[in-house]
Image: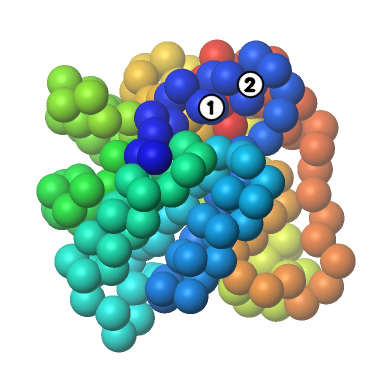
Amino acid sequence: MLADIRYWENDATNKHYTIAHFNVWNAEMLMGVIDAAEEAKSPVIISFGTGFVGNTSFEDFSHMMVSMARKATVPVITHWDHGRSMEIIHNAWTHGMNSLMRDASAFDFEENIRLTKEAVDFFHPLGIPVEAELGHVGNETVYEEALAGYHYTDPDQAAEFVERTGCDSLAVAIGNQHGVYTSEPQLNFEVVKRVRDAVSVPL
């Protein structure tokens, strides 16, 4: 069943559990994730973004994704990940994504706020939740080099950011990165705890 991410993220936060979030970019991955969620009787977030579409047409894959989510026996959220522009996330919404990420983390703090709030102000009246990112999670690279210039999420900035943007959830940078790690990740869980205490929205 197609589900509202806000309900399930709030339920997970209140009951102290996590919801798995999987990036998928082909039918096999999509079916595998939904099958596993049904076997575990667990809600699940399935997502893709510009970097994951590959040779599959966005329209075809999004329609397949939404159709399979509706037919699933567990709650499934369809999420557009790391939307770099309003045009991109608007297109994702028109093709059935019921959760959107406006990722302006590459910009400075004030511009990140402005761009995120622009998305929130547009999509909230339509009933669509918006995720944001603060700090910068790098792409696949040599992990040690990535850590050298890593921008961890600042808990004080996170509190201001959430208040000023009205975003529904926040992606944070804690030493994680996208892609395959080239060495043992050095995750800073103290940052997670401090951000969790500072903001009212799910992480």
Q: Nearer the viewer, residue 127 or 178?
A: 127
Residue 198 vertical position relative to residue 126 in the rendered view, above or below? above
Residue at position x 67%, y 74% in the image? 180
Q: Nearer the viewer, residue 3 or 165?
A: 3
Residue 14, quarter of picture: top right
At label 2, the amino acid type is Thr
**Residue highlighted by disc 2:** 13
Q: Residue at x 63, y 41 (%)?
A: 41
Q: Characterize the local packing of mark 2: few (<14), some (14-19) or many (20 or more) Cα atoms within 10 angstroms.
A: some
Callout 1: SS:
helix
Determine which residue is flagged by label 1: 9
- Res. 150 in view: no
Q: Position of residue 188 (x, y in %)?
A: 80, 43
Could you say which is closer to the camera, residue 51 or residue 62?
A: 62
Position in image of residue 146 (x %, y %): 67, 66
Give the quarter of the figure containing the N terminus.
Answer: top left
Q: Are marks 2 and 1 in contact (CB under 8 Å)?
A: yes
Q: Which mark is residue 156?
A: none
